[in-house]
Amino acid sequence: MSILDETHAPERRSFVATANGHPDFPIQNLPIGIFSRDGGERRSGIAIGDAIFDIGLALQSGLFEGEARMAAEAAAAPELNAYLALGAPARVALRRRVSALLAVDCPEQSQVEACLHPSSDCAMHLPARIGDYTDFYVGIHHATHVGRLFRPDSPLLPNYKHVPIGYHGRASSILASGTAIRRPNGQTKAADADAPTYGPSRRLDYELEIGVFIGPGNSLGEPIAIGDAAEHIAGFCLLNDWSARDIQAWEYQPLGPFLAKNFASTISPWVVSPEALAPFRIAQTPRAEGDPQPLPYLFDEKDQRQGAFDLELEALLVTEALSQKGLPPHRLALSNTQHMYWTVAQMIAHHASGGCNLQPGDLLGSGTISGPDLASAGSLLEATEGGKSPIRLASGEERLFLEDGDEIIFTARARREGYVTIGFGACRAKVLPARQ
């Protein structure tokens, strides 16, 4: 767990007025990302209220020195891989310096103000070059709900509580928030059909997840010890791992997800650091009585004490009819990362345990994080009980799965008494019709 310092102080305020009380980006957060203005070059910046602090301009103004300058120089690029590779000391140095620069008592305020851009004038991009993407399945309620649809008497397969389950996804189709996704075409087979057909997916779904960016990597053939795994975490984002359930049902045996998953995944553009989330670390939820103890390579006492997070996750739906009638988004789910059966450190340790080399900028997905009831179901597959029970909207519409024109929005909040609430920014995307 990162040591709490002055950057977490609830009394610290920013001279950027919109940061004070901002639901996502107060001065206690300071996530990093990649932005551009007017179609220009991509630059690194830090979110503060409704503004972006331009790291490159701050470097040119001489606002950094020492280790903070080294970190800023690595970050001042069109992608953050070199910065992510530096690890915690560099992140902490940059965070502390930027926090001081944006605070109300900053003596260089006029210079700092010249490095700020309104967020509304900027476009956000993927924060890093994502070389590899692996999606896990650590939401035990999701695994149980989905398993019960197909195996009512034994929803969890025997390996689930022994090994963090995952699959390798497609990095090239990961998109930044705000980029529309297109409904995929694929093979599907109706239960009463003799042969499959090819066409647009009719059971398009979202999956409510968090993403984890890898920082320092490991050499090929060299595992990462569970006690060291947290040192390889560079930051977090929200992740929507879109799923075509009808394509998935036909293709997934025997090798697992393929075209049903690789057409698009959406992430929020800001990388929220482990340091920003330090006040919101909690003990891992105890396993149920009778559950197996993790094998030694997956078990660490410190990780069990503080390797989990208390993050509230929300999924919202906006339809064209809701917008036309001036109605608010419909809440599909309210869940929490406390429902993860495995910690992020366990995910990393297992991923590297066979010798796989993780690299800076690689992305891991948690898998769908659902709570125990339908109100916290992180996918429509669960919320509609396999497409049998429609969700009714205030517009008079119903949804079993997503329709063209629907927009899914994820948000996250980290709250704890005595600390300022921080968020991740939105992870959103609209569904476009399939190609003919």
Image (spheres, helix red, strand yellow):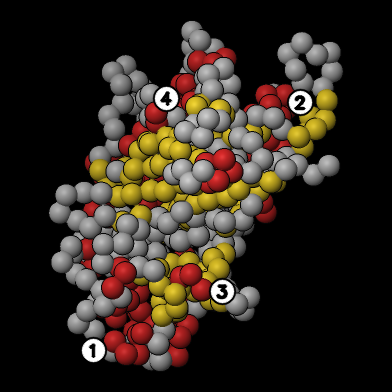
Q: CA distance from mark 1 to mark 2?
A: 63 Å
Q: Point out residue 298 in the picture as x, y percentages from the top left corner.
A: 39, 37
Q: Which residue is mark 4?
A: 374
Residue farthest front in this picture: 325
- Judge by depth and name the residue closer to the eye, 361 or 227: 361
Residue type, numbered disc 2:
Thr
Q: CA distance from mark 1 to mark 3?
A: 28 Å
Q: Which residue is mark 3?
A: 36
Q: Is residue 319 left or right of residue 117?
A: right
- Judge by depth and name the residue closer to the eye, 17 or 90: 17
Residue farthest top in this picture: 153
Q: CA distance from mark 2 to mark 4?
A: 27 Å
Q: Point out residue 392 in the picture as x, y percentages from the top left corner.
A: 50, 27
Residue type, numbered disc 3:
Ser
Foreground mark, 2 or 4, reads 4
Q: Which residue is mark 2?
A: 188
In this picture, is 399 found above or below 215? Answer: above
Q: CA distance from mark 2 to mark 3?
A: 40 Å
In this picture, is 185 found above or below 75? Answer: above
Q: Which residue is mark 1?
A: 107
Foreground mark, 4 or 1, reads 4
Specify the label residue 181 is tagged with. none
Query: Which numbered disc, 2 or 4, marks the residue that appears first in the sequence?
Result: 2
**Label 3: how many Cα within 10 Å (few below 14, some 14–19, many 20+):** some
Q: Is residue 342 left or right of residue 406?
A: left
